[in-house]
Amino acid sequence: MDYTMEDTQNSAPETREATKLSGAGQRGDTQSVTKRLQAELMQLMMAPSPGISAFPDADGNLLSWTGTITGPTETPYEGLTLKLSFAFPNNYPYSPPTVLFKTPIYHPNVDFSGRICLDILKDKWSAVYNVQSVLLSLQSLLGEPNNASPLNAQAAELWDSDQEEFKKHVLARHRDVDDE
Amino acid sequence: MISSVPLNASRRRVFGSVFSPAPLQARPTSAPGSDYDQTQLASFQSTSSTVKTGSFASPQQERFAEGPHDRESWDQAWSAATAFLAVPNQGFAPIYDARETDGSEALKDWNRLSPPSKETAEALSYLTAAGQQGSTAYGATSSKSLIDWYGDEIRRHFLANLRSGLYELLKTLEKEGLLRIIVDCLQLARRIYLAPVVHYLLPLLQTPERGRVLTQLQRGFHTVVSHSLPWSKISPLLGGELAQDALIILGIDTLLEDAEGNEGEGSQDEMEVDRQYSVSYEHWKNESAETRARMMTEGEDERVTIARDRLLAFLNGLQQVGLGGDKAQKVFASVMNIMMTEFVRAAYTGQWEAPTSVPQHLRHWIENVFARLAVQVLAIIHTPQTGNQSSSPLDVSFGDVEKWQEMGIARLGALRTSELFDVIVEWPASSGAVEDLRHFTTHPAARAHVTQSFITILNQRLLHPGASTVEILQVYISIIRAFHLLDPKGVLLDRIARPIRRYLRDRDDTIKVIVSGLLAEPAVAGTKPPSYANETLVELSTELSKAHQLSMENNTSELDWDDMNWMPDPVDAAPDYRKSKSSDVIDSVISLFDSKETFVKELQTLLSDRLLQKREKYDQEISVLELLKVRFGDSALQACEVMLRDISDSHRVNIAIRKDQGLIQPPARINKNKRPPSPPIPDIHAKILSRFFWPEIQDQEFKIPDEVASLQRRYAAGFEALKASRKLTWRNGLGQVLVELQLSDRDFSEEVTTWQATVIHAFHSDYDEPTSRNVSSLSAQLEMTPSLVRSASLFWVSKRILTESSRDEFSVLESLPSEDEDNDFGVVGADPADADTQAGDVSNAAAAAEAAAAAAAKESADAAAMEKMNLYWQFIVGMLTNQGAMPLARVVMMLKIVVPGGFPFSNEELREFLAGMVAKGKLEIVSGGNYKIVL
């Protein structure tokens, strides 16, 4: 019920936005993307939020970043460091970035390749979101998985039935990705 | 003589009776000679010798065939004639000794002038007569054979007697005049050889025969001479001789003397002579047109005439002995080639005055002096084929002269090209040189040469770390102007400017120099000491106002279809060449940088410095800003505009607030102005700056004296009343204070900085006791950095207000140390010896104060830098957290990419900073020198 409401509310402006702004993307205006990303980076650096951080990769074009989330306290992920990769499309921020977990993670909404099921990264994306908000959403997703649409059904089931067992799975799956 | 011919026949019989028929006696004298000759000559003239042998043999055969009588008389005549004609083998020495006489003595010695005895004369006429009677078969050949024989005799004699001697001469080390000696010797030898022929043999021949015979003998002589003397040795000698005289004739030697400044002939009248005949450009250009025309053609200098005669006589000799001709012409040509270069160099080096007539002068010189010598010389050393001198055609045509003139201009161009850098440094006093160059840069190759060589010179002499940016910019401006004159299209400039612009972009202080140049006051510039003028480009500000007017005038573009003077871009223009504004100095300088932003930023910084100075008017800044707005547009300079407005507004606001708050005391002064030692309340003025629009100003924070602080509060209250919703933040570090100090024996009044005033205020006491303070307590009291306190104290030491009694302990110098002994106010630690040194130390103290101030400034700058570094620290943390450990170089690289505005620190500075972080335990260094964040 709620979801459909939201859908109708959000989808209409989004499609309009997409058509209007795809032109901007087609122009291949990477400069404006770079500018935007630079501004986001600056914002992240100037006002860092605890537990999350992100930085561009060394390839120099700012279109791919690496993010880091520290597992929130009082969740099965407490104390773990989780890395993510961000790939920004050329028409960012009018299209969402592709976000993947690089660190192997056991989570109801993340599959074993690290793909994430999160509405704001898909159809609920809006240009007002940014790297910081994505990271914050993911951080909260760690503590509150959306078990209604799981990618990892076993994890979703386990989350609801046996937290202890779930945490064991999390720790078993977790592996720190090597620093380069 | 012809009358004697019929007699000859009758006398044959007489000969026969008188002379015993002993032809074989005479024959050997000639035969071995000729044999010897042939072997010698075989190497180079085998054909001619065989022909000759043939001619010898055949007449004898015929003679034998015809009958003994004729043959006998012939033989007798032959032996007499050959005995007479034979050249005595006296070796080389007599000729060498006699070379400088007129030769008559030598000819006598050599028995060449004594008339032949009667019999000999008859024998000669018999033989020649036989030769002239063409019908007589053997006669014709016999006459010829006598000449042939004599030719062989010359050869033999030359090779036997002279050759080795000449060879020795050539080997001598003394080259000076050697060729002249050789030529003299050869000429004498020639006379010796030819005298009897000319005197006694030729008259016997018929006129048409004479020339032929003489030519034949001469040619034989020439051949043997050129064979014996290797040309490779002769040509440098000839070149030296030619050069020596040509230097004088062409007037190059006087030019060189003039250049060296020592006029060999210093007396007055000879100076007059010089005036009449001179090839010097300096003399020439000062004369009227008619005098100019006459200057090189008339009134030739005596020296030149002598040299010319000498040279021509020498060349005559050369030609006579067979050393002239083609080869000599080649040598002459190469000498003249050098001469032209030499002349251009000697005459025009450094002659850069503006209305130039150098090309005219050069053309004139080539036509009247250079070509004249060439004509004269070539008339003498013509090629032998043309034979008679008088009949030879003019060797030099007017076309040749024109060609030489073109060459001369090219040489001039080469000279100017090599001088170009100096010319440009001297600009605008040297514009004449550039005009000269214009004559040269008419075709693409020359233009390419000019630009290429100039760029090379630039790289060597200008674009290196030793040259200051001001210098480079100065030269660049001169280059722009000079090349605009040289090539109004700007193609050359476009090419030259590229390396300079590229280089200037790499210099850190380029913008600063340009901006301060723009803001410099042209009016004041003249009165500034040169050392200061060298540091700023005052020219730029002059140019700015000038260029503005210019740009108003001609606003033509490529799209102006009505432009009747339109010309296509030159063929050698670069593809991205833009014609427009290439002559506009300001535009060229400003466009050095890709964006206006850097420029505007620098302008802001400098402007803020200047606006904060205590001054009544800021007309210069306002006018510069207006002019720059024309170029950059209003929006780019908005911040600067606001800054200026702030200043003018605060002037008004200042008056209003002071009136409202009752702060007015005569005399009113602009700016914050405090007098710490009250009773009288200090006078305060303020400038109100809109923080957002001003560049970041480095400030020293400290606690100001209470009196002033209370005044500030009142002032601030007044301001807030005037402008609601705005607040004042005081920048105590900026501003000036007029300090008046009353000491026991003197008064002191000077304008100082706020922090200096604050420090001296702390020494204030109402009692007559000298106050003493130390740096650390002052620092705590005033909340000022110790280094700044120390700097201020040292400043006062330099003013002889304070004295440093011990390290970091300062006390007031109530009375000057010279009166110290009589005075009860003992300055702490001022024993007599100390007092002596103290006086001398004032200057030291001043220097120390400056150094300390610099140190304090650096400290605050460092602090500011560290603050900035903290921002970068956030980036570094983010980077290392997400991307893992990385080495320093990579960190720097990443920072350069991701930090907006770039990363201003060097690797070393960052390393230092990171080392600090490692020490604090925030970072660690893992394998391979990688920095890793400590979580």
Image (cartoon, rainbow, N blue to C red):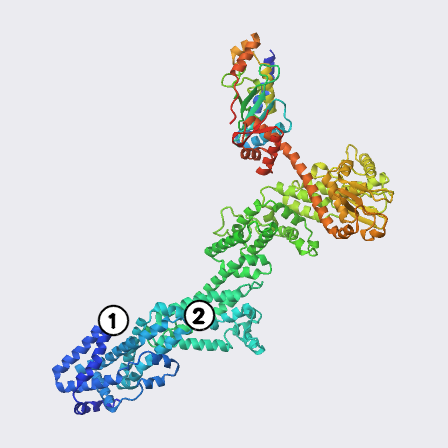
Q: Where is residue B311, by image quadrant?
A: bottom left
Mark carried by residue B45: 1
Mark 1: secondary structure? helix
Q: Which residue is mark 2?
A: B243
Query: Counting other residues with Cα less than 10 Å from the Cα at mark 2, is it few (<14), some (14-19), or many (20 or more)?
Result: many
Looking at the image, is mark 2 or mark 1 earlier in the sequence?
Answer: 1
Q: Residue furthest top?
A: A161
Residue A64 screen position, x and y as percent: 53, 28
Question: Is residue B903 visible in this depiction of the protein?
Answer: no
Observer-nearest of B752 and B604:
B752
Q: Alpha carbon of mark 2 to alpha carbon of mark 1: how far?
A: 34 Å
> Looking at the image, which is closer to me, B193 or B33?
B33
Total numbered labels: 2
Which of B85 and B628 lies nearest the eye of the viewer? B85
Q: Mark 2, chain letter?
A: B
Callouts 2 and 1 on one subunit: yes
Instruction: Say left or right for B915 vs B20.
Output: right
Name the residue: 20% across, 84% down: B26
Circle 2 — which element? helix
